Structure formats: structure tokens, C-alpha cells
Image (cartoon, rainbow, N blue to C red):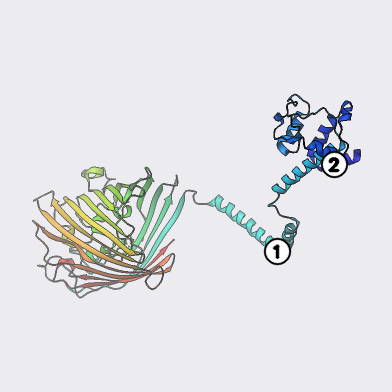
């Protein structure tokens, strides 16, 4: 029996505890109480009640030497029973039958626990299948292991030589071919003799922008943009000047022109961050432009690289107030609210500490815009800008020469600009938009004069036209025109018509052919219409 007993002990720690407990509770004095038959055991077991806590035994104390073993068997494994009167009788002798019954109960309980714990584990057949698959695909596994090792090595090399952990590079390059067509150059003054013929050759030029975008908290962004290009304006010089070349009007300007003779310049430095979940703040050291900071309500055509081809067709001229200086823009846009508000202050010569310059004494713009979006399909904005300019260019070279500089020879001009813009998207593939603006201006030096201006535009964008990602666009409108005031109004009216088709070659390449037609340039009915053909290719990375 001793050998059999120890073999049972090796099977389970529970058996060892039960046997150890039973062996030490035997007493020769109580031998006459032993149960010697199965029938007697059955009869005695009927008088035993199952317990769930050792504290239920009135004759078991924590000071008993076997208390911990009994507690484990009762509370952890649930395989020890007591008598109906709440006693365990730990000092009475143990019969072989009682030992067999207790041991069997504990083994059944242990098997139940093992089955529960391993029900979801793999069996031997599953392990054999896995081993066979591993042998069959050993070559592929070795190749994969080698590729993982190579990737780890490359990743370590990149981490050791990376440019920055906080900065990424975003770039855009434009290749442009354009040519202006027309019988004669435009003139600003109807009393001026009609200009002679102009000769414009096809020009192939480029513009490149590289932006370094850094984030330090994950919710902020520092932008430093490098710029270079050699795209000469179709005017060849300021419209109305004695050195006018080509078309003679800024109304034929492209939306992405600019000439640095391909010398690299830093044209934009700003830092934006969230003041709260609803407030976004942007501080600009240079290159501040309203149209980069606020909604212009012309989503298909705002971008100079992927939007309209013309300068006027990108958005309302009200967003060209106070361009290229320093400034502060704050946007308040509560979540789940149809209303948002943007406010800005821009100073063109903020870096100059001289007389009539600086943050407050030089040219500056105060701007505010209230946006209302009652649904995903409709969005409307009401905009106001007050501008003070020491070198007048009221509409950022998008209107006639007289509209941009109505008080020739007057260096200080104050203007109040009012605008309304809207976008309607009846479907995911169709966008209809437009704007209208009214401006009043006053000269602040010399003879006091005033002028009124009006302009409007309408746009139509058809997405996925012919192919997914393509956009067909039509833009029509009236650029800024002097409509009244002491300076008198312009007698003619210019109309701007533009058609373009942006073709998506890939996620990073688009090609946009288009035609621009200017009717009655410079708001002068004596001028001939001027046409501009353009092919723009844009690479983004």
C-alpha cells in the first residue's frame, strides 16, 4: 500500500494534501468507529453535508496544524465534506473507504478544473499539423525571417540618420506653358489712344514650393516655406504703366505666377496651435495671407497649384487684403455647431521699425468672417475687411488698374470691404459657388476723394468628370470695377470667363489645360478681347 500511496501522491498535489491530512487524523482509540463496508460508507455519506468554507466547521480552529491544508481543499478545490452538525472530526481515524471516497472526489474536481482551463487550447493533432506546416514552408519562413532582419537593420539606419523626429517635408512643383492672344494691348483710360499690337510667345516656366512642417505637441504646426519660380506675369509690367508689355492688364494674370528668377526665398513662416478644442490660433512672421488661413468658399478652385488657372478665378478679392506681411488669425469653430467665426490682423510692413511702418502704423488689415453651414450641402459666409494702404493696390491686382489705384498720386488710402460668399453641393460630384463684394475707399492725403467698387463671380465644378479624380470647371464673373464716387465710374465692364479641366494622372500628378477670356479688358469697351491658353502640370510630394 505504501508504494501505491506514493504513486498517487505524484499524480496531484491535492492527493498529497488529502492523504497527509487523513493520515495525521487517524486515532487507534477511535478504531471501533471505522466504516468497513461500502453500504456503511454510503449510509454514513448520507449524513455528510458539503461545505464551501473552512469556517463552517465548528471544531476546526485557525491554530490547528492542518488548518491551511484543510482550507485549501475546502475553499480552493471544494472536495471535502463535513457532518450535518457542522463538525469535521479531524481527530477520528480514517478508513480505507473514506480515503478512497475523498481521494476520488478531489481527483474529479481537479480534472474538472483542468478541463475548464484547457478547453480552448490546441490538441496533439493541431500541434502535429503545425509542425508539418512548419516543415513544408521552412524555406519561405527562412526568407521571411531574412526580410524582417533586413527591415530591422534599415529601420535602425533610418532612425540613426533621420532628418528630424518632428519635421516632414511637403513639396509642390509646377511646370507651366502659357500664351496670350489678342489684336492689341489693353489701355486703362478710354480717352487714351488704342494701343498697338502685342506679340506674346509661348512661355515655359516653373514654380517650386518646399514646406517644412514641424509639430511639437501633435496638435500644433510650425511651417517654413521655401519658394522659387520664373513665371512672368502676362502683363509684363504693372498695368497702366509706361513700360507696359504684352496684354497691358492684370486681369490676364495667372493664379500661380511669380518671378524670383529661380532664386530661393523664404516666403512663409508661421506657427499654428489649438488654444482650446474650439479655438485655433495662427501667428505669422511673414507671408501672411488671409486665403491661406480662412475658408474662401471655393473648394475646387482656391489652390494655385490644383485650382483655378487665373488669379481672379481662385476666390473673392476680399481675401487678398493685407497680403504677405505678418499677422495673427484666430478661428472659433465649436464642434457640432453650424456657426464659426474667424478674425485676423495683418500688417504688411511689421518688420520695419521706421516711420509710418511697423505693426500698427504701416499698411494693415482688420478682418472678420462669420460662416454659417446649416447642412453639409450649403455653406455661406459674411466677410468684412478694413484696410489701410500706403501703396494702394486695393484688390491685389485682380481688377482694373483704376480699381486697384483709384487715387493716382495718393499714397495713403483707407477702404472698407464687404463680401458674401456661398457654396452649394447638391451632390458629391457637383459644386456651385460664388461671391459678391462691395468696397468703399477714401484718400487720406492730398485732396480728399472717395470711390465705390463692385465685383462678383460664379463657379461650377464637376468632379469625376470622365474619370475618378478629374474636375471640369467653369468660372464667370465681373472683376472689381469703379462704380461711383468723386472719381467717377468706369464706363465699360470687364467680364471674366474661364474653362479648365483638371486631369488626375496619379495621386501626385495632375495636368490642367484651360482657356481664359477677358471681355472688354480694363473695363474699357474700346479694348479688344484677350485670350490666354494655359497647360499646367503639378507635382506634389
Residue ID for mark 1: 137
Residue 378: image x %, image y %? 30, 59
| Nearer the observer, 122 or 105 | 105
Quadrant for the N terminus, please: top right
| 493 lies left or right of 330 | left
Q: Residue at x 74, y 25 (%)?
A: 61
Residue 188: image x %, image y %? 15, 65
Residue ID for mark 2: 8
Secondary structure at badge 1 equals loop
Q: Residues within 10 Å of mark 1 (few under 14, many from 20)?
A: few
Q: Residue at x 24, y 53 (%)?
A: 382
Quadrant for the C terminus, please: bottom left
Picture quadrant of residue 99: top right
Secondary structure at badge 2 equals helix
Q: Residue at x 87, y 39 (%)?
A: 37
Picture quadrant of residue 58: top right
Residue 434: image x %, image y %? 25, 62
Looking at the image, can residue 354 be seen? no
Q: Where 67 falls versus 38 (above or below)?
A: above
Amino acid at each position: 500500500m505504501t508504494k501505491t500511496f506514493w504513486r498517487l501522491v505524484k499524480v496531484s498535489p491535492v492527493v498529497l494534501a488529502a492523504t497527509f491530512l487523513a493520515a495525521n487524523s487517524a486515532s487507534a482509540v477511535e478504531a471501533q468507529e471505522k466504516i468497513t463496508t461500502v453500504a456503511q460508507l454510503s449510509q454514513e455519506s448520507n449524513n455528510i453535508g458539503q461545505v464551501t468554507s473552512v469556517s463552517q466547521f465548528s471544531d476546526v480552529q485557525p491554530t490547528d496544524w492542518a488548518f491551511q491544508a484543510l482550507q485549501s481543499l475546502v475553499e480552493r478545490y471544494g472536495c471535502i465534506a463535513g457532518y450535518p452538525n457542522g463538525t469535521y472530526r479531524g481527530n477520528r481515524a480514517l478508513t480505507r473507504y473514506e480515503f478512497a471516497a475523498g481521494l476520488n472526489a478531489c481527483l474529479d474536481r481537479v480534472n474538472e478544473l483542468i478541463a475548464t482551463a484547457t478547453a480552448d487550447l490546441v490538441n496533439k493533432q493541431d500541434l502535429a499539423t503545425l509542425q508539418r506546416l512548419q516543415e513544408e514552408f521552412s524555406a519561405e519562413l527562412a526568407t521571411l525571417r531574412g526580410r524582417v532582419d533586413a527591415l530591422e537593420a534599415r529601420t535602425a539606419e533610418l532612425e540613426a540618420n533621420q532628418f528630424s523626429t518632428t519635421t516632414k517635408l511637403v513639396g509642390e512643383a509646377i511646370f507651366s506653358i502659357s500664351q496670350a492672344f489678342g489684336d492689341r494691348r489693353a489701355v486703362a483710360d478710354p480717352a487714351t489712344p488704342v494701343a498697338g499690337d502685342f506679340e506674346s510667345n509661348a512661355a515655359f516656366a516653373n514654380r517650386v514650393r518646399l514646406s517644412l512642417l514641424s509639430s511639437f505637441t501633435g496638435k500644433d504646426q510650425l511651417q517654413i516655406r521655401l519658394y522659387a519660380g520664373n513665371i512672368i506675369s502676362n502683363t509684363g509690367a504693372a498695368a497702366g504703366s509706361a513700360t507696359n508689355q504684352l496684354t497691358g492688364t492684370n486681369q490676364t494674370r495667372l493664379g500661380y505666377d511669380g518671378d524670383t528668377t529661380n532664386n530661393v526665398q523664404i516666403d512663409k513662416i508661421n506657427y499654428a496651435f489649438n488654444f482650446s478644442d474650439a479655438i485655433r490660433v495662427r501667428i505669422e512672421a511673414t507671408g501672411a495671407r488671409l486665403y491661406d488661413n480662412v475658408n474662401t468658399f471655393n473648394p475646387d478652385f482656391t489652390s494655385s497649384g490644383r485650382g483655378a488657372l487665373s488669379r481672379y478665378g481662385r476666390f473673392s478679392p476680399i481675401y487678398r487684403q493685407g497680403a504677405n506681411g505678418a499677422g495673427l488669425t484666430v478661428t472659433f469653430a465649436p464642434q457640432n455647431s453650424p456657426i464659426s467665426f474667424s478674425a485676423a490682423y495683418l500688417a504688411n510692413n511689421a518688420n520695419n521699425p521706421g516711420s509710418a511702418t511697423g505693426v500698427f502704423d504701416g499698411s494693415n488689415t482688420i478682418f472678420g468672417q462669420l460662416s454659417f453651414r446649416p447642412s453639409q450641402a450649403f455653406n455661406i459666409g459674411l466677410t468684412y475687411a478694413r484696410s489701410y494702404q500706403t501703396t494702394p493696390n486695393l484688390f491685389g491686382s485682380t481688377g482694373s488698374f483704376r480699381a486697384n489705384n483709384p487715387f493716382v498720386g495718393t499714397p495713403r488710402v483707407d477702404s472698407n470691404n464687404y463680401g458674401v460668399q456661398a457654396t452649394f453641393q447638391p451632390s458629391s460630384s457637383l459644386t456651385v459657388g460664388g461671391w459678391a463684394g462691395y468696397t468703399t475707399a477714401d484718400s487720406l492725403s492730398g485732396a480728399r476723394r472717395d470711390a465705390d467698387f463692385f465685383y462678383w463671380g460664379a463657379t461650377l465644378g464637376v468632379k469625376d468628370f470622365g474619370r475618378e479624380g478629374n474636375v471640369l470647371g467653369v468660372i464667370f464673373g465681373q472683376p472689381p470695377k469703379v462704380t461711383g464716387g468723386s472719381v467717377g465710374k468706369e464706363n465699360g465692364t470687364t467680364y471674366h470667363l474661364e474653362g479648365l479641366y483638371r486631369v488626375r494622372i496619379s495621386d501626385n500628378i495632375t495636368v490642367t489645360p484651360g482657356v481664359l477670356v477677358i471681355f472688354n479688358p480694363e473695363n474699357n469697351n474700346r479694348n479688344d478681347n484677350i485670350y490666354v491658353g494655359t497647360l499646367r502640370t503639378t507635382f506634389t510630394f
